[in-house]
């Protein structure tokens, strides 16, 4: 008897990214504007320590601090780690070291990249200096990286600075991005494969009998494996919803639209889905909906009203 081949292991590359916009207080504004002008500023705390990068509140007293000082663009490596596979948008596109550098005049370390030929050329205690970017805009990337130098032992006192610059930087946009490969387990693989057949399959807990959709492979309440597959839906009930008014990048859906929690018939908890084919201001809790599949689609494109009477609140209140 020939054993059945193991199911295909599903994998999908995923990217999560968004721009994070924040305004700057007077200390951070002075620090980033200073980098644009090839000046490194720190802030002095209540106990006389100089923090670089600067913070706006004292870590000991929690009081606001504003006493800015200028420190040197040279410093000492306190610890490091070699990065032999630089990722996109990292400071250097060739292997480099991540280093913590205590700049001369500072008491805390700054994290940045060190351009070095190899890990054998990096050591704790080595002297380094800032390599400034050719074009500077008022961001931490104005420090292109650190590079080794041979200027003797650390020294130098911080110099008071009023933080005054022309055309100060008042805000930044930080691009957050996460690249990863997702591989579902046994339970979610079965769920995804069933969706491609226009079926929705969950798994029932043998202890509490709740049907999880999408299945998780185990019951989070009882802590036991779930292996009993149960087909649910296709229709369901809107338990709660939100109206989306901001258009997402690369998503070809006009705003406003509705995204809802939908409790499919027979399921023990609600899943997410977009509601379509109905004006957004007519969507309501208790609305009965069904999936709409596009030609060749492997999952429902959206859910639309079935035309049935709304579900009674008591029928879905435990699933909100």
Image: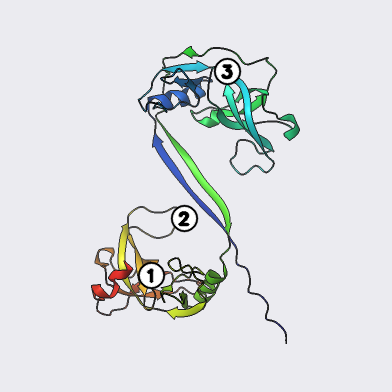
Q: Residues within 10 Å of mark 1 (few under 14, many from 20)?
A: many
The crowd level at tag 2 (other Cα within 10 Å; few <14, some 14-19, many 20+) is few
Marks 3/1: CA–CA distance: 58 Å
Residue appearing at x 50%, y 52% in the figure: 16
Q: Which residue is drawn at the image coordinates 66% and 24% (left, top)?
A: 125
Q: Is residue 91 left or right of residue 191?
A: right
- Residue tagged by mark 2? 250
**Residue 104, disc:** 3
What residue does disc 1 label?
A: 269
Residue 78 to residue 247: above or below: above
Find the distance from the CA under tag 2 to the CA under tag 3: 46 Å
Q: Position of residue 316 (x, y in %)?
A: 29, 72
In this rendering, does residue 249 appear at all? yes
Image location of residue 168, percent across then percent down: 41, 24
Which is in the foreground here, disc 1 or disc 2?
1
Circles 2 and 3, Cβ within 8 Å, touching? The answer is: no
Dot 1 falls on a residue whose secondary structure is loop
Q: Quadrant of residue 234?
A: bottom left
Going by the image, does 73 lie left or right of 25? Answer: right
Q: From the image, which quarter does the N terminus lie in?
A: bottom right
| Residue furthest to the bottom | 1
Give the mark nearest the N terminus, 2 or 3.
3
Q: Quadrant of the C terminus?
A: bottom left
Q: Give coordinates of residue 86: x percent, y percent.
A: 65, 42
Location of residue 115 in the rendering, given as x and y in whole percent from the top left corner: 67, 31
């Amino acid at each position: 008897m020939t054993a059945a081949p193991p199911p295909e292991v599903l994998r999908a590359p995923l990217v999560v990214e968004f721009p994070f916009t924040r305004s700057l207080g007077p200390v951070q504004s002075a620090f980033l504007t200073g980098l644009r002008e090839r000046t490194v500023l720190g802030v002095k705390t209540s106990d006389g320590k100089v923090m670089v990068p600067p913070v706006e509140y004292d870590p000991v007293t929690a009081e606001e601090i504003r006493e800015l000082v200028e420190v040197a663009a040279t410093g000492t490596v306190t610890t490091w780690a070699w990065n032999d596979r630089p990722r996109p948008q990292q400071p250097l596109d060739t292997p480099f070291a991540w280093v913590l550098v205590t700049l001369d005049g500072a008491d805390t370390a700054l994290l940045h990249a060190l351009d070095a030929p190899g890990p054998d050329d990096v050591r704790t205690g080595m002297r380094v200096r800032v390599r400034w970017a050719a074009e500077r805009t008022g961001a931490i990337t104005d420090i292109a990286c650190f590079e080794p130098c041979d200027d003797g032992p650390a020294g130098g006192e911080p110099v008071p600075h009023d933080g005054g610059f022309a055309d100060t930087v008042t805000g930044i946009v930080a691009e957050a991005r996460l690249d990863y490969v997702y591989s579902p387990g046994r339970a979610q693989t079965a769920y995804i494969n069933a969706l491609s057949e226009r079926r929705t399959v969950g798994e029932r807990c043998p202890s509490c009998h709740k049907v999880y959709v999408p299945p998780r492979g185990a019951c989070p309440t009882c802590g036991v494996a779930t292996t009993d597959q149960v087909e649910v839906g296709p229709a369901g009930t809107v338990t709660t919803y939100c109206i989306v008014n901001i258009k997402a990048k690369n998503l070809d859906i006009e705003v406003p639209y509705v995204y809802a929690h939908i409790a499919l018939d027979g399921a023990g908890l609600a899943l997410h889905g977009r509601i379509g084919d109905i004006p957004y201001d007519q969507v309501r809790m208790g609305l009965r909906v069904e999936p709409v599949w596009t030609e060749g689609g492997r999952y429902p494109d959206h859910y639309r009203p079935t035309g049935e009477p709304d579900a009674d609140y008591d029928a879905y209140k435990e699933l909100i």
